[in-house]
Image (cartoon, rainbow, N blue to C red):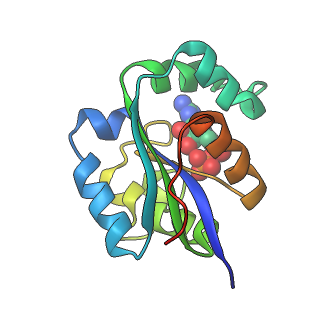
Amino acid sequence: MAIERTFCIIKPDAVEKKTTGAILAKIEAAGFTIRALKYVHMSRETAEGFYAIHKARPFFGELCEFMTRSPVVIAVLEKESAVAAWRTLMGATDPAKAEPDTIRKLFGASVGENATHGSDSLENAKIEIAYFFAGSKVAPSA
Ligand code: GDP
């Protein structure tokens, strides 16, 4: 198994509810190292670009509306097999179907407002990190 980096968004619903700290604490308790962290209010253009893969889905407009309604916290997480580990810690897309003690079960409200985003592959993690952190210094591994 290899050390990987994945991309995380703490979505507007979770930031609004002031659960950012609790979510970051769970991330660190699970053994991830936070290599970059930023507070961002996405523009419509940024959200539409980020979710371009979902453009044809019926919820695309609703998703972009949600992701731009207030700020998010974005992070680069590092750990062995980070991509899969972060998706396991987040839980299923629909919080009602998520395993107990996962972030979406604990902090998500609905299939749309589900507290966090996580990259679904190593390839997409690299693309998503570059999308939001291009030009920023992401800390090298210790
Ligand atoms: P994820 O990889 O678990 O985040 O799930 P997807 O890639 O399938 O969907 C991306 C995001 O779109 C989800 O995290 C939700 O925020 C949103 N989404 C997915 N399905 C729905 C839906 O049926 N309705 C709405 N409003 N949003 C959805």
Image quarter for residue 127? top right
- Position of 101 relative to 80 (above/below): above
Instruction: Between residue 104 and residue 27, name the one nearer to us.
Output: 27
- Position of 97 relative to 46 (above/below): below
- Position of 116 relative to 77 (above/below): above
Give the residue at the far top of this rendering.
44
Q: Is residue 69 left or right of residue 107?
A: right
Residue shown at 73% from the left, 32% from the top? 54
Residue 11, image x and y in percent?
42, 38
Asked if one can make out residue 113 in the rendered structure from this viewpoint, the answer is: yes
Instruction: Say how many tags the image has.
Output: 0
Residue shown at 54% from the left, 38% from the top? 136
Residue 6, image x and y in percent?
59, 58
Q: Is residue 74 left or right of residue 129?
A: left
Residue shown at 43% from the left, 55% from the top? 96
Image quarter for residue 31? bottom left
Residue 58, image x and y in percent?
69, 25
Image quarter for residue 105? bottom left
Residue shown at 37% from the left, 71% from the top? 100
Q: Is residue 74 left or right of residue 49?
A: left
Give the residue at the far left of this rendering.
18
Quarter of the figure with the N terminus: bottom right
Asked if one can make out residue 98 in the rendered structure from this viewpoint, the answer is: no
Residue 122, image x and y in percent?
73, 60
Q: Quadrant of ligand 1?
A: top right
Instruction: Between residue 38 and residue 43, name the one nearer to us.
Output: 38
